Amino acid sequence: MAKKKEFLSPDYLFEVSWEVCNKVGGIYTVVATKALHLQEEMGRRHVFIGPDVWMHRAGNPDFLEDPMLYRSWKAQALSEGLRLRVGRWNIPGKPVAILVDYKYFLPHADEILGQLWELYGVDSISGNWDYKESAVFGIAAGRVIESFYNYNLKGGEKVVAQFHEWQTGAGILHLKSAKIPVATAFTTHATMMGRCLSGNNFPIYDNIAQYDGEEMARRFNVMAIYSLEKKSAQYADVFTTVSEITARECAQFLRPVDVVTPNGFENSFTPASDQEYKELHDKARRRLVQVATAMSAEEVPQDALFVCIGGRYEYHNKGIDVFIDALDRLNRGGKLGRSVQAFIMIPSGHHGPDRELEAKLGGNGNPEYRSQTSHYLMNAEYDTITRRLGELGLTNSIGDKVKVYFIPSYLNGDDGIFNLPYYTLLCGMDLALFPSYYEPWGYTPLEALAFRIPTLTTTLAGFGKWVKDHYKKAHPGITVLERDDHNYDEVVAGVAARVEEMAAVEKKDRNKIRENAREVAQIALWDNQIVYYQEAGGLFPGP
């Protein structure tokens, strides 16, 4: 009779990410929501490590420093050359967070990279400054764990250190060379080669076996990143990724994964009651209407359909190209019974909010002034989104059925135009569209569903496939379009059709669709997903 597998419950769990107390992408939400789920079980034994990007200045809204927490160890760490701050991550549950001054080690970057080559064969020669910063941060995080273990633990504890993405992988290699008994896990949320290939319009799904990782890494000049990512995967005790889609890439370019650990979400991040949700919806809708009216210099109809896309600025990978082309199709000949107000909420480099737009929103601007972009873009002449909008004539002319607004700022509540966080604005939308080509998991569609927003994604998003495999009932709250290497035009048509469909929905049916959206999101709650991390824990070597 086979022995039943027992999952490892670590005495201490260190979790290292560039996005600890530093919101730059979807991994922030992954890690933050999982933290809340684990707080009751682990408390102070779940420790996050991130970069001190604020460089010891007060004001990081994500970090609450606590000078008394691990005070004696902190003094010891300083004597070892580790500059860090200890406190709490300012999210629900307020887990312990250690922020490392990795820049202190940058003058020694060449020495650190040389050691990675000598010990593990990491090829850093072509690495640029961003690569060096990440490698140095990973090493610094590994040293923090080593110091914490030696000072605070007795030696018999089961300790796990999980490292997210290649940017932290050097920490795994440091712990291996330090030979301390800490089990390591490496989680890639997207492979570098998958991102490069898809971003450069290489078909990656039909013929992934034809691509040699090292050859393509040299072709795209990402050899340093690829090398660090591959060695991190190879030397970690457990290697995980977030979806079966990405697991195929890992097997081709890095090594086979030990277990797939799909992402989850926490209900505590969403409105607690229908009344709270309605208040957020109304607040967001009022502001969306105000901004749309100011940007278009035209009154927004009361029954307008508000649609959006959000996420990372990856024009092809995230389906921004599909989103824009579908809006063009609707503007030229769609069967729309309502005006469409479309928001592209994609962070990009900018020089601050449009001052004329600010003046209009404050009641002092020129009423004839129109703006399609809410903030002054850096290198605006090279911006892909605004160039495509211009090519198609989606310029918000008076009378256009479809209006499009590019919001290139992080929506953290103080962007200068909306001054509301992304989640609040999401509540004001009628439809969220994420027609991705490359989306290892797909946190943006999951977030939208959790906030009761009807959503569209594709079968090339890990979450889209998860819905198809795990939610067998009717799901009017989410559309999952079939997408492959060759059916771009069909996907554009499918997105346009979904907008038309939602524009025709009667008011009495909208709440039913919203409630189904929320129900679908329940299949990816951490209550359901944490079991995969427990399975990963069971793969670690015993003490």
Image (cartoon, rainbow, N blue to C red):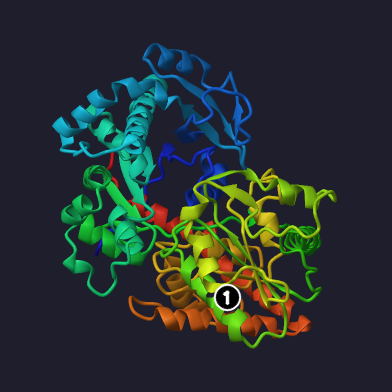
Q: Quadrant of residue 183?
A: top left
- Is 194 left or right of 496, judged from the image as shown? left
Residue drawn at (43%, 60%) of the image: 262
Residue drawn at (80%, 68%) of the image: 299
Of residues 472 and 165, the one nearer the viewer is: 165
**Label 1 CA crowd tier, 10 Å (few <14, some 14–19, many 20+):** many
- Is 481 left or right of 260, judged from the image as shown? right
In the structure shown, which secondary structural element does the residue marked by tag 1 occupy? helix
Residue found farthest to the top: 79
Residue found farthest to the right: 363
Residue tagged 1: 327
Is residue 443 among what the camera can see? yes
Place of residue 82 in the rendered image (x, y in percent of width and height, measured from the top left): 40, 19
Place of residue 439 in the rendered image (x, y in percent of width and height, measured from the top left): 42, 63
- Is 423 left or right of 381, judged from the image as shown? right
Up the image or down, 335 lies above or below 306; here it is below
Residue drawn at (49%, 77%) of the image: 480
Q: Quadrant of residue 399?
A: bottom right
Up the image or down, 66 lies above or below 494; here it is above
Is residue 6 among what the camera can see? no
Q: Amino acid at mark 1?
A: Leu
Of residues 130 and 26, the one nearer the viewer is: 130
Q: Quadrant of the C terminus?
A: top left
Q: Quadrant of the N terminus?
A: bottom left
Up the image or down, 91 lies above or below 458; here it is above
